[in-house]
């Protein structure tokens, strides 16, 4: 098993795990309940962590890097047709109107 992700927040780790699942990569969540040991262990070692099979390591790292590179933001609504669009789109897929709000 290889560790591919860790974060202070279990929510972030759970999100990363979902991202991997979307790509069909199974991962194992470790340290889910270890925060109580904080102080006895190096801090990073107590963070929730994701592990994948050795064979999945590269694919998992790529998927996580891709997600990290995606623009942050919230969905926006097309002023022309009212379609709700994901933040990574800069124009409406339905009517072609551009106009994503700049973050
Ligand atoms: Zn539109």
Image (cartoon, rainbow, N blue to C red):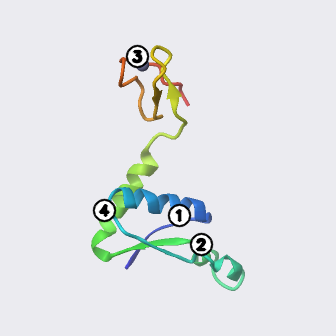
* In front of the other: 15 or 65: 15
Judged from this view, the residue extending furthest toward the front is 82
- At x 33%, y 69%, the residue is 57
Q: Nearer the viewer, mark 3 or mark 2?
A: 3
Callout 4 secondary element: helix
Q: Earlier in the sequence, mark 2 or mark 4?
A: 2
Does 35 appear above or below 87? below
In this figure, which residue is indicated by the disc labeled 4? 59
Image quadrant of ligand 1 equals top left
Residues under numbered marks 1 and 3 in contact, where contact means CB atoms less than 8 Å apart: no
Q: Is residue 54 left or right of residue 28?
A: left
Q: Nearer the viewer, mark 1 or mark 2?
A: 1
In this figure, which residue is indicated by the disc labeled 2? 47
Question: Percent x, y for residue 34?
Answer: 63, 79
- Mark 3, ligand 1, within 8 Å: the answer is yes
- At x 56%, y 31%, the residue is 103
In this figure, which residue is indicated by the disc labeled 3? 97
CA distance separating discs 3 and 2: 44 Å
Q: Quadrant of the N terminus?
A: bottom left
Callout 3 secondary element: loop
Q: Quadrant of residue 44?
A: bottom right
In this figure, which residue is indicated by the disc labeled 1? 13
CA distance separating discs 1 and 3: 36 Å
Callout 2 secondary element: loop
Callout 1 secondary element: helix
Residues under numbered marks 2 and 4 in contact, where contact means CB atoms less than 8 Å apart: no
Q: Earlier in the sequence, mark 1 or mark 2?
A: 1
Residues under numbered marks 1 and 2 in contact, where contact means CB atoms less than 8 Å apart: yes
Q: Nearer the viewer, mark 3 or mark 4?
A: 3
Q: Earlier in the sequence, mark 1 or mark 4?
A: 1
């Amino acid at each position: 098993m290889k560790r591919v992700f860790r974060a202070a927040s279990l929510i972030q780790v759970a999100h990363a795990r979902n991202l991997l699942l979307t790509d069909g990569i199974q991962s194992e969540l470790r340290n889910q309940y270890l925060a109580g040991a904080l102080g006895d262990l190096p801090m990073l070692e107590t963070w929730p962590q994701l592990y994948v099979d050795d064979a999945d390591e590269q694919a998992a790292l790529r998927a996580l890097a891709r997600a990290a590179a995606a623009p942050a933001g919230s969905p926006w609504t097309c002023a022309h047709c009212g379609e709700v669009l994901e933040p990574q789109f800069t124009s409406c897929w339905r009517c072609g109107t551009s106009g994503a709000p700049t973050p």
